[in-house]
Image (spheres, rainbow, N blue to C red):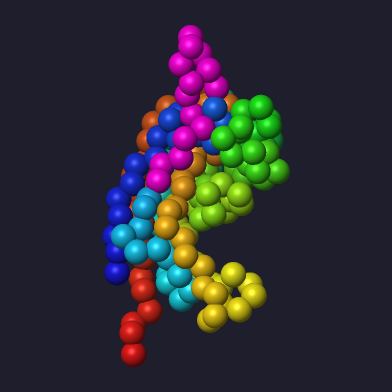
């Protein structure tokens, strides 16, 4: 079993990258490099506390990692709709412009940013094969990329710590 603690920052680790005053913010994931690559049968779990918040600076404001306001004074449904970043803001990970997740949610990638999946406050999955012949050609996934999902990053604040756990099948 492997345990990892990782902090994801709403501005630095935003999927969207923007420049202000000559400094580029966002566009860089928080990375978990596994001590042994993930492969078929491994169980990946990612957890955080549901009431810890970060802030997108607009829309719903402070949300948990599910992109849901924890203590909203008056949130409108349209504030919770998913966001898709503009291609110009995701040049490091251009495939992100084809995805839409709740603003303020934690999103991951296991293939270097070619595809993305929602994680939120609690996520568990079993790593499967590559869809062809899993036993003959299992995947080897060395790194998990974690992003704060937003359509811009300059007004983002806060960070949330996540626990990442890998459970390997027992060797018989």
Image spot of residue 150 (x, y percent): 57, 34
Which residue is drawn at the image coordinates 64% and 38% (left, top)?
Answer: 94
Q: From this viewpoint, which residue is outermost toward the bottom?
A: 172
Q: As rendered, which of 113 and 77 lies closer to the eye?
A: 113
Q: From this viewpoint, which residue is outermost toward the top?
A: 21
Which residue is drawn at the image coordinates 48% and 74% (left, top)?
Answer: 40
- Say if 165 sits above or below 104 in the image: below
One can see residue 40 in this view: yes
Which residue is drawn at the image coordinates 56% and 47% (left, top)?
Answer: 113
One can see residue 66 in this view: no
Q: As rendered, which of 140 and 59 lies closer to the eye?
A: 140
- Dominant SS of magenta comes to strand
Image spot of residue 140 (x, y percent): 47, 65
Which residue is drawn at the image coordinates 30% and 55% (left, top)?
Answer: 4
Instruction: Tell me the magenta residue range.
Output: 18-31
Left or right of 59, for residue 48: left
Left or right of 132, for residue 121: left
């Amino acid at each position: 079993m492997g345990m990892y603690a990782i902090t994801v920052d709403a501005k630095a680790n935003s999927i969207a990258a923007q420049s202000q005053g000559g400094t580029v913010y966002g566009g860089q994931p928080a990375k978990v490099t596994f001590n042994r690559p993930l492969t078929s049968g491994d169980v990946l779990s990612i957890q955080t506390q549901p009431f810890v918040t970060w802030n997108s600076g607009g829309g719903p404001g402070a949300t948990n990692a599910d992109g849901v306001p924890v203590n909203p004074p008056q949130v409108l449904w349209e504030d919770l709709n998913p966001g898709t970043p503009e291609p110009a803001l995701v040049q490091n990970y251009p495939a992100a412009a084809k995805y839409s997740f709740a603003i303020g949610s934690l999103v991951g990638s296991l293939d270097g940013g070619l595809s993305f999946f929602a994680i939120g406050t609690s996520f568990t999955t079993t790593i499967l094969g590559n869809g062809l012949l899993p036993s003959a050609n299992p995947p080897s996934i060395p790194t998990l990329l974690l992003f704060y999902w937003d359509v811009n990053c300059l007004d983002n604040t806060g960070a949330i710590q996540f626990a990442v756990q890998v459970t390997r099948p027992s060797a018989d």
